[in-house]
Image (cartoon, grey):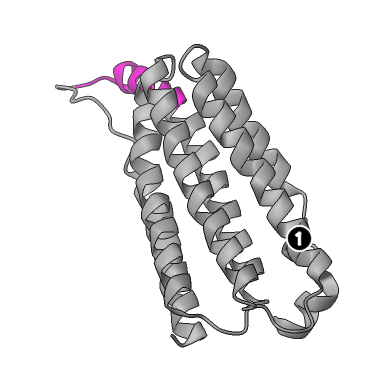
Amino acid sequence: MNKTRFEAFSDGVFAFAFTLLALGFVLPELHAPSNRELSTALLRLWPNLIAYFLSFSVIGIMWQNHHALFRLVQRVDRKTVFWNLLLLAGAVLIPFATTTLGSYPTLSASAFFYGAVLSLCATFYNLLLLHLAHSNAFVPEVPQTTIASTIRGYRIGWLVYVGATLVALVLPIVSFAAYLLVVVYFLVPRGADSDTHISARHW
């Protein structure tokens, strides 16, 4: 597949997932409400707001990492498209998981479901990355140390997501903190995202 078309499609799906996040805010039906009743209803949405910012950060980092990775890829084959489609399918599911978590923030089922969706995305991302490495899809200038560092970094993220998902079965609030921890972890450039020399030549 043409790489430009591949990246444009991926960007469009990520943008769609961003948009869907805002649809998770639903006010209860109020009959002839006063300002006080409306303000109270809005304030009750604070769990949804926290879940929104968490998921916005997750999808934003996912999009940034996807861009950082594929600027170093020289060709896109059928298996790359396959794993990428599964990754995007998981990303589009994040808004629904976000709404569930925001509506029932203290329940194990909602925290587990949210973690399961993020773990699914992380799984497909790691499988995509491994395929790119094994098929020598990266440009020749990318050193093996950069590829190895990228694989190691995202494997750690996957482990934390899976661990947080299991913790959600007994301590949903703790799992929420772990999901935030992964966001902070990926804010630090690593691997392909931190190789500024390669990035400048293949932007």
Vertical relation: 80 (above or below) 119: below
- Reading the image, the residue beneath label 1 is 148
Q: Is residue 40 magenta?
A: yes
Relative image position of residue 189 (x, y in whole percent): 77, 55
In-image side of 187 versus 109 (left or right): right
Bounds of the magenta segment: 33-47
Q: Secondary structure at mark 1?
A: helix
Nearer-the-camera pick, 156 or 68: 156
Q: Is residue 131 visible?
A: yes
Residue 177 lies, with reference to residue 79, above or below; the image says above
Considering the whole magenta stretch, tell me its main secondary structure: helix
Q: Quadrant of the C terminus?
A: bottom right
Name the spot of residue 80 as percent of width and height, x first: 48, 71
In the rendered image, which quarter is residue 111 located in? top left
Q: Position of residue 138 (x, y in %)?
A: 67, 78
Q: Quadrant of residue 146?
A: bottom right
Query: Label 1 is placed on what type of residue?
Result: Ala
Q: Residue furthest top?
A: 170
At horizontal 72% and vertical 58% (from top left) the residue drawn is 150
Magenta region includes residue 167: no
On-image quarter of the N terminus: bottom left
Q: Residue at x 56, y 27 (%)?
A: 164
Q: Residue at x 31, y 23 (%)?
A: 38
Give the mark count.
1
